[in-house]
Image (tube, coloured by chain):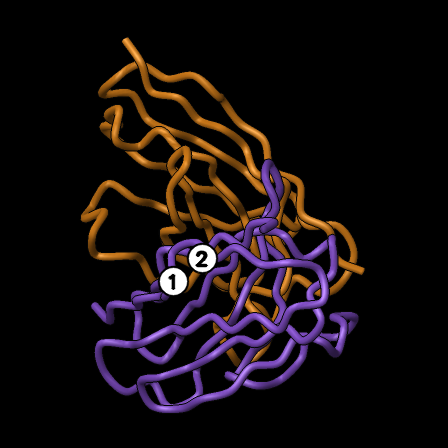
Chain colours: A purple, B orange
Amino acid sequence: DIQMTQSPSTLSASVGDRVTITCRASQSISTWLAWYQQKPGKAPKLLIYKASSLETGVPSRFSGSGSGTEFTLTIYGLQPDDFATYYCQQYNNSPWTFGQGTKVEIK
Amino acid sequence: QVQLHQWGAGLLRPSETLSLTCDVYGGSFSGYYWSWIRQPPGKGLEWIGEINHSGSTNYNPSLGSRVTMSVDTSKKQFSLKLSSVTAADTAVYYCARLAAAEANIDCWGQGILVTVSS
C-alpha cells in the first residue's frame, strides 16, 4: 500500500495567515492526489483533485501543488470557516489511502 | 445535485455482520463507482472498497474476505456487508461517490456511527 504522511499533525494559525500543509507519498503517485476538509461531526468535503484542480464552489484561497511524492495545500488568508482537519488522499494505486490528517487550530 | 443517504444498524455485538445501505438521490447512478469509507472515533479515514452499477468491485485487502458490496440499480442503492465484526470495526461509516474517471471522492453521505460492543 502507498503510505501518505502529512505534516504537521497540528497547526496553530490566525485569521488572515497563509497556511501550508505538506503531504508525502511513499512512492510516486504522479498528480493523483486529492485534498479534503473535515469539520467535527461532518463528512469530509473535496477541495482539490488531481493535485492542483480546484473543486467547483471551493474558494480560490485554497491552492494545491506538487507531483510525484511531495504535495502541498496552501490556504491564502485563513478565514474563520477554515479551522478544520485536512486530509490528503492518493488515488494512483488501489487501495486508495489517506494521510493521517492535519488539524488547523485557532492561535 | 446528487445526495447520498445511508442507513443501517448502529449497534452490533462481536462476530455479527455489519449491514449498511446507501440511497442515491439525483444525478446518474451508472457511470460512477460507489464507495464506502470509515473513520474510527478520533482517527483518520480508511477506504473500504467500491462498486459500480454493473457490480464490479474493488476491496481493500486489509479487510480480507470480510467485505461484500452489492448494488441495486433499480433502487439506486448500494450496500456494504462486513462480517465477523470486532471492536476494531467501530467507526463512522460513510458512503460516497467517486468522481467520474478518477477515484477522488466528490460526494459523501452523512455518515453513520456503528459501534461494536458486547
**Residue in view at x 41 percent, y 33 percent:** B41
In which quadrant will I find the N terminus of chain A?
Answer: bottom left
Q: Which of marks 2 and 1 is nearer the N terminus?
A: 1
Instruction: Describe residue A91's horizontal placement relative to residue A104 as left or right.
Output: left
User: How many residues crowd mark 1 within 10 Å: few (<14), some (14–19), many (20+)?
Assistant: some
Kind of residue sitting beneath label 1: Pro
Which circle marks residue A102 in the picture?
2
Instruction: Describe residue A26's horizontal placement relative to residue B25 as left or right.
Output: left
Dot 2 falls on a residue whose secondary structure is strand
Q: Of B92 and B78, which appears nearest the observer? A: B92
Q: Quadrant of residue A55?
A: bottom right
**Residue in view at x 74 percent, y 53 percent:** A80
- Whole-percent x, y for residue A53 in the image: 62, 84
Disc 2, disc 1: CB below 8 Å?
yes
Q: Label 1: which residue?
A: A8
Kind of residue sitting beneath label 2: Thr
